[in-house]
Image (spheres, helix red, strand yellow):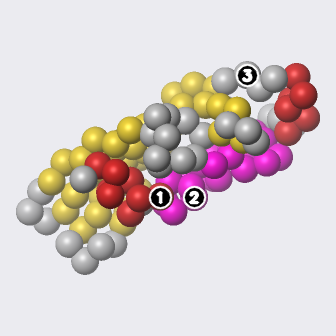
């Protein structure tokens, strides 16, 4: 069920990643809900579902750029709200990818 919930909120996850990294990198990272770097914790309530996702966004050939934690609430009608976004850490890019680091950051 965790995988299904991760797929359900995947567009919101990508939006949050894009928002956070837009001033840090000139290329927007992505994530893969089916790879080892993405884990979900799901809690079920009578009125909603809480989904907490820990993911490792990447650029290019799966070069990790960081670790991020997000929390979402999905109500009974399917409406999804972002409750929290927390950037946990950055990873250094290899020298041949450092050109995507925003120099103003």
Query: Is residue 19 visible to us here?
Result: yes
Q: Position of residue 23 (x, y in %)?
A: 75, 45
Foreground of the two, 8 or 72:
8
Residue beneath the point at 91% across and 35% down:
99
Front residue of 88/5: it is 5
Mark 2: which secondary structure? helix
On-image quarter of the C terminus:
top right
Return the residue at label 2. Answer: 15
Nearest the camera: 25 or 11?
A: 11
Q: Which residue is mark 3?
A: 92
Say above or below: 12 vs 78: above
Q: Which residues are magenta?
A: 11-30
Q: Earlier in the sequence, mark 1 or mark 3?
A: 1
Q: Say which label, 3 or 2, has the lower sequence index.
A: 2
Circle 2 crowding by C-alpha within 10 Å: few under 14, some 14–19, many from 20: few
**Residue on which the image places disc 1:** 10
Instruction: Estimate the x, y position of residue 28 in percent, counting from the top left.
Output: 72, 50
């Amino acid at each position: 069920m965790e995988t299904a919930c991760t797929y359900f909120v995947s567009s919101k996850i990508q939006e949050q990643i894009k928002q956070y990294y837009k001033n840090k990198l000139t290329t927007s990272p992505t994530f893969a809900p089916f790879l080892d770097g993405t884990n979900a914790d799901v809690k079920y309530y009578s009125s909603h579902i809480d989904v907490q996702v820990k993911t490792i966004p990447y650029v290019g050939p799966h070069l990790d750029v960081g670790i991020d934690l997000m929390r979402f609430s999905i109500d009974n009608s399917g409406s999804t709200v972002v409750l929290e976004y927390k950037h946990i850490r950055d990873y250094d890019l290899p020298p041949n990818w450092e050109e995507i680091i925003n120099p103003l950051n």
